[in-house]
Image: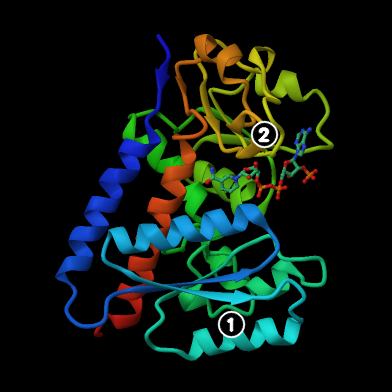
Amino acid sequence: MTNVIDGKALATKIKENVKAEVEKIKGIKPTLACIIVEGNKASEVYVASKKKACESVGMNSIIARLPEDVSEEELFQTIDKLNADDTISAILLQLPLPKQLDDVKATNRISPSKDVDCLTYENLGALFSARGTIAPCTATGIIKILESENIDIAGKNAVVIGRSLLVGKSVANLLEQKNATVTICHSKTQNLKNICQQADILVVAIGKTKFVTKEFVKEGAVVIDVGINRTEDGLMGDVDFDDVKDKCSYITPVPGGVGPLTVACLLENTLILYNQQTKKD
Ligand code: NAP
């Protein structure tokens, strides 16, 4: 029987734990600053939901809003100001940025101590050296999903389709740290279906609606669908859920799978950064 993983329920548990920790904090509560450069509808939705999530656990949040034609210099001034502000615990630069800006360069302007999505070179270096204190929120959420279902990772064949730093490479690294044998696939991968058919755990993060069908999936595999695609029929994943679901042992739906975990782990990461900044030696 296939288990459809309830990401919302797991995210609620994580948020309850964060809320309980935040309640214990006396004085200024952890604060997340989201920087949004206007012009991307999906980014507006994500930032609004992150702000709401902060409020739901008693954290503060601010949104730094910049116009679509903002220059690199102006963006960097905003990031520098937030870096220097002691009341800000964590900074999230909502990606993607408009064409005139460089996502990687801008992300690296964030102070590593406030880099809540773990995308600065310093934090990625720590992550890839297995010394990180946080990891990118979505990748962390995927591991939490697997662990919450007691799914064995060690020794399993994990295939990750997608190699972005934000998702593919990060989750592949976390899976490898948990002793999976990991294959990363991308748009130039040959024999993709054959490789995916070897996967005990298949993570799909490509941004292509219903790309993965049952021909990609080994009987009894765990399928984690990271994709969020906005279509006329609503939000859709990268996996053709109806086609695949009877073939796998576990599957995450879209919506209600990985997405809620990303937000919950963002709150958890904000709390971790706050604790690191306020820790008395
Ligand atoms: P991205 O930066 O655009 O990366 C997409 C990756 O998919 C690239 O590595 C690309 O390969 C690969 N790819 C594209 N077409 C492919 C194909 N036909 N076969 C094999 N690989 C292919 O995207 P991302 O930021 O990783 O996000 C991926 C998806 O996850 C999107 O739908 C995004 O909205 C969603 N997402 C969801 C959450 C969540 O919370 N659920 C969080 C973040 C992202 P190349 O490198 O060769 O181009």
Dividing the picture into quadrants, the one containing residue 232 is: top right
Q: Is residue 177 visible?
A: yes
- Residue at disc 1, secondary structure: helix
Q: Amino acid at mark 1?
A: Ile
Q: Is residue 151 above or below residue 278?
A: above
Name the residue nearer the viewer: 281 or 235: 235
Q: Is mark 2 within 8 Å of ligand 1?
A: no
Which residue is label 1 attached to?
A: 79
- Residue at disc 2, secondary structure: strand
Which residue is label 2 attached to?
A: 231
Q: How many neighbours does mark 2 have within 10 angstroms: few (below 14), some (14-19), or many (20 or more)? A: few
Q: Is residue 281 above or below residue 92?
A: below
Ligand 1 shows up in the quarter that is: top right
Q: Residue at x 54, y 54 (%)?
A: 45
Q: Is residue 178 visible?
A: no
Q: Residue at x 58, y 59 (%)?
A: 44
Q: How many neighbours does mark 1 have within 10 angstroms: few (below 14), some (14-19), or many (20 or more)? A: many
Q: Residue at x 53, y 64 (%)?
A: 118
